[in-house]
Amino acid sequence: MDYLYFFANASLCLRVVEYLRRTKDIPSSSLTLIHQINGWILRVKFTEMLTPCQHGNFKALMNELGIPFNPEPRIGMVLWDLDAKQSPVEVMRRYQVAIVSHGEPDRTEIEAFREQFTRGLGYCPETLA
């Protein structure tokens, strides 16, 4: 089952990553995180179906932090190509998107992206807060 949400800033995405890392009773997951100029698109895929209780808890967290996202065709193709095991670098080149993380949930990738992006700009945009 996929959960696809839009988040306003990086801190909210990091909260989801931490939840996935510290909650031991849910199946392992794969996370895809795409940065856009106005926010973040986060997709979580679980290797197994969640129980109704796990689903309810996870959906409540996601609804509290973000909003459900219905992808435009280009983002849908990005996610489809990633599911087809294409290289994230190739997908980024083809669709001109910033894939910050794809695979195991890892906060270091998000933090490194934030640091490099803000260093290049000289200030921290609201979406990277």
Image (spheres, helix red, strand yellow):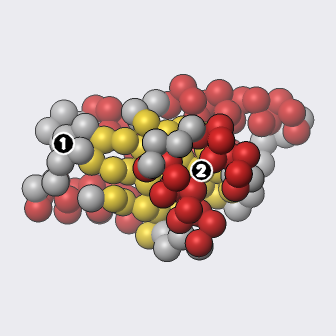
Q: Which residue corresponds to mark 2?
A: 34
Among the 4 quarters of the image, the one containing residue 4: bottom left
Residue bearing the label numbered 1: 26
Amino acid type assigned to the residue bearing label 1 in the image: Ile
Q: Is residue 35 left or right of residue 49?
A: right
- Which mark, by number, is residue 88? none
Q: Do we see residue 12 in this rendering? A: no
Instruction: Pinpoint residue 37: horizontal percent, then vertical percent.
Output: 74, 57
Q: Establish if 53 lies above or below 119.
A: below
Quarter the C terminus occupies = top right
Quarter of the figure with the N terminus: bottom left
Spatial CA span between label 2 and label 1? 23 Å
Q: Is residue 103 visible?
A: yes
**In the image: residue 125, left or right of residue 72:** right
Give me the residue at 50% from left, 31% from top: 107
Is residue 5 shown above or below 85? below
